[in-house]
Image (cartoon, helix red, strand yellow):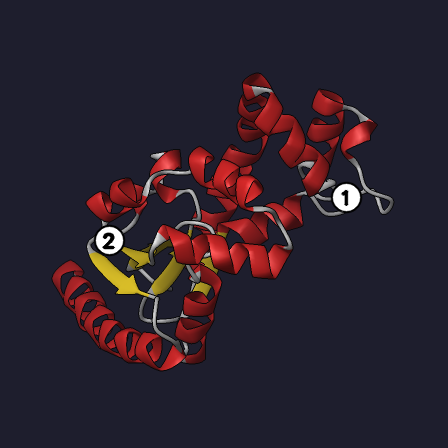
Amino acid sequence: MSDYVVGLTGGIGSGKSTVADMFVALGVVLVDTDAIAHELTAPEGAAMPALIEAFGTGVLDAHGALDRGAMRRLVFAHLEMRERLEAILHPLIRTLSAERCRMAESSYVILAVPLLVESGTYRERCDRVLVVDCPESLQIERVRRRNGMTVDEVRAILAAQATRAQRLAIADDVLLNDSGLAAVAGQIGDLHRKYLQLAAKKLKASC
């Protein structure tokens, strides 16, 4: 069981998933809150009865899962709908992520929280916060290429997230992802060694 949690965050298009996968390749357990949200909103997911009651069947896709595109459009248009969605999903995600962090069988665990800054409640659960950072222009380029969105659509998502400055303000560590995978891998190797040492130090102190 792991007692050392590194919170991983970054804006859309920053490369959080790539970074998380590279930590996993080093044997680190990943607890991904976005993946948990997908589990909860899959067909027969634990959150689906409450979501259907709150929003109706119009937010379902053909398979009975949450239609994330339809929900995204709804919450961007109506703030109260976003608050209602978060009130349903966030407590479930927090509970599951905390349980999985406790059960992680690695020296430390990566807790990936895309909205770590915005949620406010995850910071206190992390021993350190690692922010994946890159210029906003590169975020826009990556998301456009990956998702086929327009610049305005990407900017709307960015506007709903914490700013780059806000993320950097809470960072204990910053991984700059603007110059290729080799540069990222080098930074991750250094961070991995650092986190192993910090986790061992915390474990020794608690004994």
Checking the image for residue 165, the label placed there is none
- Examine the rendering and report whether any part of residue 101 can be seen: no
Q: Quadrant of residue 117?
A: top left
Of 96 and 65, nearer the camera is 65
Residue 109 is left or right of residue 175, and the answer is right
The residue positioned 78% from the left and 46% from the top of the image is 43
Labels 2 and 1: the sequence-earlier one: 1
Of 176 and 56, nearer the camera is 176
Disc tally is: 2
Identify the element where label 1 is drawn. loop
Residue corresponding to mark 1: 65
Of 180 and 88, nearer the camera is 180
Q: Amino acid at mark 1?
A: Ala
Residue 202 is left or right of residue 76, and the answer is left
- The image position of residue 27, as x and y in percent, is 41, 78
- The image position of residue 79, as x and y in percent, is 54, 20
Q: Amino acid at mark 2?
A: Asp
Residue 54 is left or right of residue 133, and the answer is right
- Quarter of the image where the C terminus is located: bottom left
Residue corresponding to mark 2: 127
Residue located farthest toward the top when viewing the structure as drawn: 80
Q: Quadrant of residue 166?
A: top left
Instruction: Look at discs 2 and 1 and give the one toward the viewer.
Output: 1
Position above or below: 197 against 16? below
The residue positioned 54% from the left and 50% from the top of the image is 34
- Quarter of the image where the N terminus is located: bottom left
The residue positioned 70% from the left and 29% from the top of the image is 51
Q: Residues within 10 Å of mark 2 (few under 14, many from 20)?
A: some
Marks 2/1: CA distance?
34 Å
Identify the element where label 2 is drawn. loop
- The image position of residue 17, as x and y in percent, is 48, 63
Q: Residues within 10 Å of mark 1 (few under 14, many from 20)?
A: some
